[in-house]
Amino acid sequence: MSFPKSSESIYSISPYIGGDVTPPGFVRRVVLASNENPYGPSPAVKRAISEYIDRLHCYPSGAANSLREAIGKAHDVDPAWVVTGNGSEDILHLLARAYAGHGDEILIPQHGFGVYKIATLVVGATPVYIPRVDFKLSVDAILERVTERTKIFYLDHPGNPIAHYLTNAEIEDLLERMPSHVLVVFDSAYAEYMETDDYHPGTKWVQRYPNVVMARSFSKAYGMANLRLGWLYAHPEIVDPIHRIRPPFNTTGLSQAAGIAALEDQAWIKHCVGLNKENLSWFENAMNSLGIKILPYTSNFVMAHFENTQEVYHYLGKKGLIVRPMGAYALPEYLRITIGTAEQMQELVATLSLCPHL
Ligand SMILES: Cc1ncc(COP(=O)(O)O)c(C=O)c1O
């Protein structure tokens, strides 16, 4: 039988492996594999969803007008500069589709978030990787790889799985020297967890440089990964092609209502970010006591180094503790561990302390 064929670049894509993919025999009891907020969304989100339930037969607002207004209010930005998407990965794909194609190059940090490569190959562009030194990106290494064919630079800000970020001073240097034909995408999915003064999620860069856009997510600190909601902030000139190509209803009314309620409860985000910080600091000390090295971290996960990574991963998975192996990120000696509740982290440490593979 002969079947119609997709393009070569599509066949070169390895499907994204998420935290839901686990070997047989694993028990999904405590899942620390997808950098979710273990406390879930604000109670106000749950109320908004139940109030919305009678409207499931109606199409949502395609432009997510009320949600964009709410984003504008919460982040002090003009709603006309905001586009919402089916998670921020939708935004990352839309940007590639609108701004790159065959023969173009897209810059991706080494070990960068997996969706960057997929979004690049989907449009037939070539991924160009920026090497890291000691897991850090440098402005010079980025600029050295820019050519006339470079269309987009996806900057994980901060990164996943490598938690590094460029400081405000480095970003300023980068944007001053970056040629204006390159769209610089700040992927700030974890911005809510960042509390240091030398970090900025990107709104101010968008306002100053016409070639900068910022992508944000409701999946991490907002605890709404299942609702698939993200947004983009960019000058209306940049936004215009996105509106032309995006599926007209790429966010549901349910997620829009949830997003509005979530934005109004910033106390919940603060509460969750505070708990994450406490649990992270406890976990770091516990890992030190076990002699397990972790890479510098910034948000709600750590990268832990093991000699026998696969054995540890299987040992934990069979005991109901699911973490994320990093082979797909060319980091096979690491497991990425999301910071869960205090009880979950205590169970993980207690289980690891009995692991015969350490
Ligand atoms: C760096 C980064 N960007 C974007 C995303 C996508 O998030 P979502 O599509 O759920 O908004 C993730 C999810 O893990 C991420 O780690």
Image: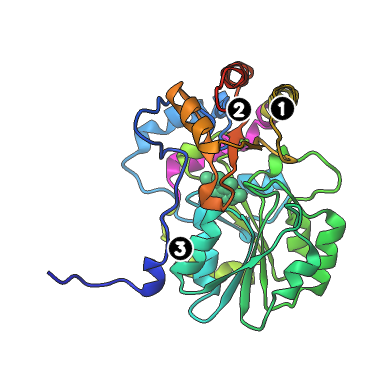
Tell me which residue sits at (68%, 32%) in the image: 266
Whether residue 93 is visible to the viewer of this picture, yes or no, is yes
Quadrant of the frame with the C terminus: top right
Q: Which residue is mark 1?
A: 291
Tell me which residue sits at (75%, 74%) in the image: 144
Q: Which residue is mark 3?
A: 246
Q: Which residue is mark 2?
A: 358
Q: Amino acid at mark 1?
A: Gly
The mark lying in front, picked from 1 and 3, is 1
Tell me how far mark 1 sits from mark 2, CA to CA: 9 Å
Q: Name the quadrant containing residue 346.
A: top right
Give yes or no for residue 76 being in the magenta stretch.
no
Q: Nearer the viewer, residue 287 or 154?
A: 287
Q: Name the quadrant containing residue 279.
A: top right
How far from the left and from the top, in percent, is residue 69?
A: 61, 48
Q: Is residue 74 left or right of residue 174?
A: left
| Image: magenta residue range | 251-269
Residue 15 vertical placement versus 307 (above, below): below
Residue furthest left as drawn: 1
Give yes or no for residue 265 being in the magenta stretch.
yes
